[in-house]
Image: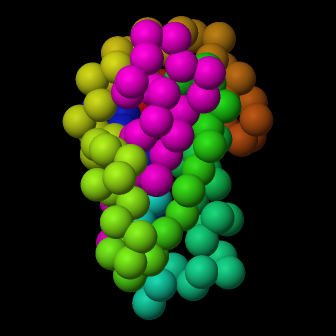
Amino acid sequence: MVIEFMLTKLPEGTEVYVFGSFINTASPNDLDILFLYDPSKCLPQNAYKEHLSFIEYLEVCSELKVDATLLTYEEQLESNFLAISKAIPVNECEELTKRFTRINYSLRSKFAAERGVSLTTIITIF
């Protein structure tokens, strides 16, 4: 599955969750994503950059703007964000999986062109 593959490209120890309107409404305006990461493996000052490819890929595949929240595991424990937001693991989000399977040829082509790789590479990987 594409999502599982993309998760392997994130910094070690990163967990990704979906929350907000995407899981609560039929017509979401954006895709709220929570990244939980280990600051010993991904420095906070580099966290957004280290997760940016995943964010960009989600935007292409979901055809929605991604609103990313990045928290360390400690910050999540202090804020209780997972429980409050009712976030679910990204790879358990059925609606996101449906959107990914509907991704069309032109979106894959666009993603490949933006990254300077061949369409064959994108199709093979994803």
User: In the picture shown, does residue 43 fall above or below 102?
Assistant: below
The spot of residue 27 in percent (x, y) is 52, 11
The spot of residue 101 in percent (x, y) is 38, 15
Q: Is residue 17 left or right of residue 117?
A: left
User: In the picture shown, does residue 16 fall above or below 13?
Assistant: above
Q: Quadrant of the C terminus?
A: top left
The spot of residue 121 in percent (x, y) is 53, 34
The spot of residue 32 in percent (x, y) is 52, 40
User: In the picture shown, does residue 28 fall above or below 72?
Assistant: above
Residue 22: in magenta span: yes
Which residue is at the front of the view, 115 or 44? 44
Residue at 43% x, 10% y: name it: 26
Q: Is residue 102 left or right of residue 117?
A: left
Q: Quadrant of the N terminus?
A: top left
The answer to which image quadrant residue 116 occupies is top right
Residue at 44% x, 77% y: name it: 75
Which residue is at the front of the view, 5 or 123? 5
Name the outermost residue toward the bottom. Answer: 40
Residue 86: in magenta span: no
Residue at 54% x, 19% y: name it: 28
**Which span is picked out in magenta?**
12-34
The answer to which image quadrant residue 93 occupies is top left
User: In the picture shown, does residue 118 fall above or below 54?
Assistant: above
Question: How many numbered circles are shown?
Answer: 0
The answer to which image quadrant residue 107 occupies is top right
Residue at 64% x, 64% y: name it: 48
Res. 9 in view: no
